[in-house]
Image (cartoon, helix red, strand yellow):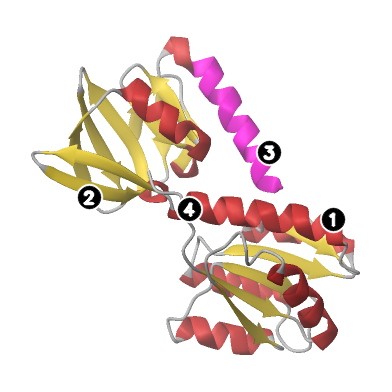
Amino acid sequence: MNNEVIKINICICDDDKKIHNVLKNEISEYRNVLSEIEIASFFSAEDLIEKYKENISFDIIFLDIEMSGLNGIDAAKEIRKFDSKTIIIFISSHPNYVFESFEVEALHFIVKPISKTEFKNVFSRAISKYTSINSTLSLKWQNKIYNIKIASIIYIEAYKRHVTVYTEKEKFEAVGKLSDMLKILESHGFIRTHQGFLVNMDFIKRFDVSDVVLFNNQKVMLSVRKRSEAMQRFNDYLMRKKW
């Protein structure tokens, strides 16, 4: 598995130039952690949305909520139509917007003025999430090696020493043990629902009595023995997603 962060594209969208300067100064302190950082600045949400329409996206967006024209919440809803993986961090002088930010799965909500300590905590989490999203899993099968984005894996099925990895677009065969896979993938939000299955919690829609139902309405087996632990892990995951 490769966790190296090579390049990260960051966007700051705020109609206050001072906020741009503060954020750029804070981000610059991470240049020894990240291999390459590119920062784009926008002073209106409309200009940011235009970039997405041009098929230009960003890994992390610092997004002000109260701007003239399109506000940050509505801008984030538009961005989500183009990209579900972009890490959005809202910034605002008014904490009462925090609950609306849940609707677009924002990573966090920073209240102005921006505290150095809070920025450090939030940005470190953003880097960690970005790294996780872009991490890969290496699989060997019939003298070929496949590097698969972990975030694209929906679930893994195993029988003895043979595993099948199902992604959003295709499936891959490999030799391996599910227990070894879990050691790698548990920190990326995978849970064991059955002796023969690992599931990525990002794709879980609900738990039924003997199945886990995914967002594509596919069902994965859920054993009685694994049910309680799996549901607890999923509840914890949902709470973390709120922040």
Tell me which segment is drawn in magenta. 227-243
Spatial CA distance of label 4 from label 1 is 25 Å
Spatial CA distance of label 2 from label 3 is 30 Å
Q: How many neighbours does mark 4 have within 10 angstroms: few (below 14), some (14-19), or many (20 or more)?
A: some
Looking at the image, tell me whether mark 1 or mark 3 is earlier in sequence order. 1
Residue carrying label 3:
239
- Please give left or right for residue 79 compared with residue 136 in the image: right
Residue carrying label 2:
170
Tags 4 and 1 touching, CB below 8 Å: no
Spatial CA distance of label 3 from label 4 is 19 Å
Q: Nearer the viewer, residue 90 or 143?
A: 143
Q: How many neighbours does mark 1 have within 10 angstroms: few (below 14), some (14-19), or many (20 or more)?
A: few
**Identity, as a three-letter code, of the amino acid under mark 2:** Glu
Looking at the image, tell me whether mark 3 or mark 4 is earlier in sequence order. 4
**Identity, as a three-letter code, of the amino acid under mark 4:** Ile
Q: How many neighbours does mark 2 have within 10 angstroms: few (below 14), some (14-19), or many (20 or more)?
A: few
Disc nearest the viewer among 2 and 4: 4
